Image: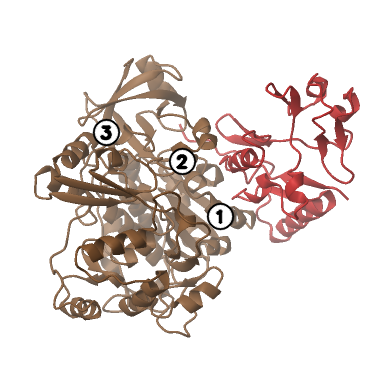
Chain colours: A brown, B red
Amino acid sequence: MTNPIPDLAKSKCIFIIGSNFAENHPIAARWILDAKEQGAKIIVADPRYTPTAWTADIFLQHKPGTDIALINGMLHTIIKEKLHDKNFVKERTIGFDQIKALAAKYDAHTVEKITGVRSSLLQEAARLYAKAESAAIVYCMGITQHTCGHGNVVSCANLALICGNIGRPGTGVLPLRGQDNVQGACDMGGLPTVLPGYARVDDEAVRQRIAALWGKEELPKEPGLTVVEMTNAAAEGKIKAMYIMGENPMVSDPNTKHVRQALDKLDFLVVQDIFFTETAELADVVLPGACWAEKEGTVTATSRSVQWRAKAIPPPGEAKADLDIICNIANRLGFKFNYQNADEVLREINLAVPSYAGITPERVKEKVGGLTWPCPTDDHPGTPILHSETFATVERLGKFIPVEHQPPFEVTDNEYPLLLTTGRVVMHYNTGSMTRRSSSLLKRSPELFVEVNQADAEKLGISADEEVKISTRRGDTIAKTTITNRVPPGVVFMPFHFSGTNALVVEALDEKAKVPEFKVAACKIAKGK
Amino acid sequence: MRKVIFMDLNRCIYCRSCEVACEREHNGRSFMSVLLLDERHPVPMNCRHCEKSPCVAVCPTRALVRIENGPVIIETMKCIGCSLCAMVCPFGILELDYLNKVMRKCDLCIHRLNEGKLPACVSSCPARALTYDEFDTIMRRIKEKAAKAIISGVGLEPGIVISPPES
């Protein structure tokens, strides 16, 4: 995220695409509504008319999986009407000619045909975004969880660059991340291609630096596997044992039947969680972890701010802080993990991750709201806004990368005529392993449902609150209907907080990011069980 | 002057945090309900603690009372659960607690107010659609907002802005 979330209040135009922040990041609504009250224009692009779309001055209801075409269509209007920031493009970017050639192909007629969005409305949105003195882009999983997810993200960056909407208050590209420390997990090397601080495993120099810090001769130079790749490798018998922490793939991963087969095939499965999840049911050993109030350490928020979280209460029963569990296991495996507390871990992070070097335990415990990386030295104030002068490329310039529209992995046909898109509801969090245990939340959203448009419901002869069977090439699921105009005809929506939804979803991956296409699958709906 | 809870209907995003917070403060019973009309208009409904409270006026056992400069509350030991208050409430706010055979309603989180805290619904509203303040202070704030809009010529939209999805 290039700018802090409260910065959105200073924006004159906010373009929200593939994010239902009103339900999934409701706190962000505070500053978006503040901006709107001060006259900012809000553009929301989403296949569903969500509570987020209620905030919109312009609502673009595009077909699932057509984000690139939609954004390229905006680029087309902006370039054609010469609304781009010529100075910024000249001084701070490279590759404008390529983007110009790309945009030329996405004329009003072509884009309307792909996206289903009326071209005059899209043109109006493009003008609003381009003409605003400061405009921000907010996106979320609606952008990333596609086989073209990587291209979707690049398209958002192209749009921000061409209008010079980066590096200033009220501008930027703001992907809203899903958990309080998912940014921190990535920063720490919780990805298969990198070591802490995004040090690429195939980069000899940085690998040696981390190896020296850890007192090792050498570290593996081959990238590991991503989540879905691990499942596939387990199914093929290439992975024999798995240690799953705070993750519930039996509900969260695509194609549940395949996940089940893969986990069953393992010789040994350890699951560490605060609750006995659907995945824990398959484990040989379950290690009870501690929840956020029962452990201490830093968390890095979506805005890159690193904050200290103190321990409020001890973990209940046999539960232990994750740090204790990991150190115990590591020591029994013959490593020397002699961390006495989270302070000592942060001191190692200060050495391992250059952008965290100045975020010491002393400083971060004192600073309410935390310190935002990059914070390379002890006296550095942190960097809430990125790219204000240069970009982190070889040329120090923002690089335009042309991306073409590509259809989703699965498209509708006679057998599977409906598009299934998945997402979240306000009452539940991820796989519901926590929220489905809260009676207050569960009674407001008690079970799996499928949103079906009025017109489709009439065609299928189904009514509200009726149990129907939703089928894809992966499997079937029973869910209750919600008949609504929130989804357009031809599109159905299901939340993934309950078992069943991801039994339907396709495990096709984005080539680069390896993220599965949770947002588009072809399905059919039949009456009854 | 007594303080009231005010709602900005344009800011409510139907997250229902207020309901859940109320439930947490009142032993699993929420006195706030957000109604969603036409899949588009969320309306948070809670006790208005009316200046001329019909519920207080009709209560035969004087169980319903107004705390001076504060909320209308039910002294449950006096309540007989006759529901007369429910009949005269224009907003359908009163609830019958079948287990304890008494009426229940919003008490503005008086236990929290006594500790200098905000009512739970207000403090948990992520969108800042709910505010708790003196009536005149809130009106002043709305006036200032409108005045600013007049000066800048932007943001002054009539009432609730309805932008229905395209068909």
Q: CA distance from mark 1 to mark 2?
A: 26 Å
Which residue appears farthest toward the left when viewing the image? A237
Q: CA distance from mark 3 to mark 1?
A: 35 Å
State whether residue A90 appears in this view: no
Residue A435 tag number:
2
Lower sequence index among marks 3 and 2: 2
Residue at 31%, 42% in the rendered image: A252
Q: Are marks 3 and 1 in contact (CB under 8 Å)?
A: no
- Quarter of the figure with residue B68: top right
Q: Establish whether labels 1 and 2 are both on one chain.
A: yes
Amino acid carrying label 3: it is Ala
Spot occupied by residue A35 in the image (x, y as percentages of width and height): 59, 57
Lower sequence index among marks 3 and 1: 1
Badge 1 marks a residue whose secondary structure is helix
Above-or-below relation of A361 to A40:
below
Badge 1: residue crowd in 10 Å (few <14, some 14–19, many ≥20): many
Where does the N terminus of chain A fall, quadrant-wise? bottom left
Task: Please report, as a chain letter, where disc 1 is located.
Answer: A
Amino acid carrying label 1: it is Ile
Q: Is residue B104 left or right of residue A15?
A: right
